[in-house]
């Protein structure tokens, strides 16, 4: 995740009112939390860096989220795990809607795309 941030300029009655800066990691965390809130998603898939951080006790809420900013529009690429038995296209559509709505509502920024990569599937636990 880049160290840059998104800046939102605000004007009130034609005069500069102030600005709000939102770090990329904050926006990525919002997207990740919205994603895992969708039924059928068992979790986000991480990369080696986030997996090592988790083992060392660090909490990485933006695990499995890649954020690109293009002309003040946000494009997400999410890597996630699906629960066995759920329709992948239906779960992905719900994730795309949830991420777009949540990020746009919380930040006021425009989400241009939510791309999804299914990285794994969790199977039901059986009692032996």
Image (cartoon, rainbow, N blue to C red):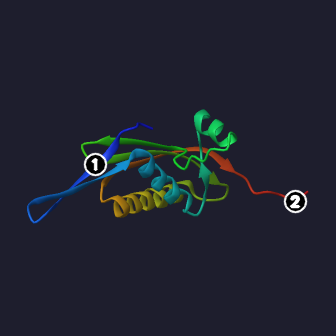
Q: Which residue shows up at 43% across the image and 57% down it?
A: 99
Mark 1 or mark 2: whose residue is earlier in sequence: 1
Residue 127 shows which numbered tag?
A: 2
Q: Is residue 80 left or right of residue 103?
A: right
| x, y percent for residue 56 | 68, 39
Are there few (<14), some (14-19), or many (20+) residues within 10 Å of tag 2?
A: few
Height in image: 74 above or below 99? above
Q: Nearer the viewer, residue 3 or 92?
A: 3
Height in image: 127 above or below 75? below
Mark 2 residue element:
loop
Check the image and name the residue furthest to the right. 128
Residue designated by label 1? 7
Mark 1 residue element:
strand
Residue 76 seen in render: no
Residue 80 seen in render: yes
- On-image quarter of the C terminus: bottom right
Q: Which residue shows up at 42% across the image and 60% down it?
A: 97
Q: CA distance from mark 1 to mark 2?
A: 51 Å
Q: Which residue shows up at 67% across the image and 55% down it?
A: 84
Check the image and name the residue furthest to the top. 48
Instruction: State which quadrant residue 50 falls in.
Output: top right
Q: Nearer the viewer, residue 26 or 17?
A: 17
Q: Check contact, mark 1 vs mark 2: CB within 8 A.
A: no
Q: Nearer the viewer, residue 92 or 11?
A: 11
Q: Is residue 19 left or right of residue 91?
A: left
- On-image quarter of the N terminus: top left
Are there few (<14), some (14-19), or many (20+) residues within 10 Å of tag 1?
A: few
| x, y percent for residue 26 | 44, 51
**Disc 1 versus disc 2: nearer the observer:** 1
| x, y percent for residue 4 | 36, 39
Residue 71 shows which numbered tag?
A: none
| x, y percent for residue 28 | 45, 49
């Amino acid at each position: 995740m880049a160290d840059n941030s998104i800046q939102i300029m605000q004007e009130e009655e034609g005069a500069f009112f102030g600005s709000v800066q939102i770090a990329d990691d904050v926006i990525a965390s919002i997207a990740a939390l919205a994603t895992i809130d969708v039924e059928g998603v068992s979790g986000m898939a991480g990369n080696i860096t986030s997996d090592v951080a988790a083992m060392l006790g660090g909490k990485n809420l933006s695990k499995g989220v890649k954020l690109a900013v293009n002309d003040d529009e946000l494009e997400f690429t999410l890597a996630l795990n699906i629960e066995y038995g759920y329709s992948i296209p239906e779960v992905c559509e719900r994730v795309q809607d949830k991420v777009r709505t949540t990020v746009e509502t919380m930040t006021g920024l425009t989400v241009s795309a939510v791309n999804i990569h299914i990285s794994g599937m969790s199977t039901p636990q059986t009692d032996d």
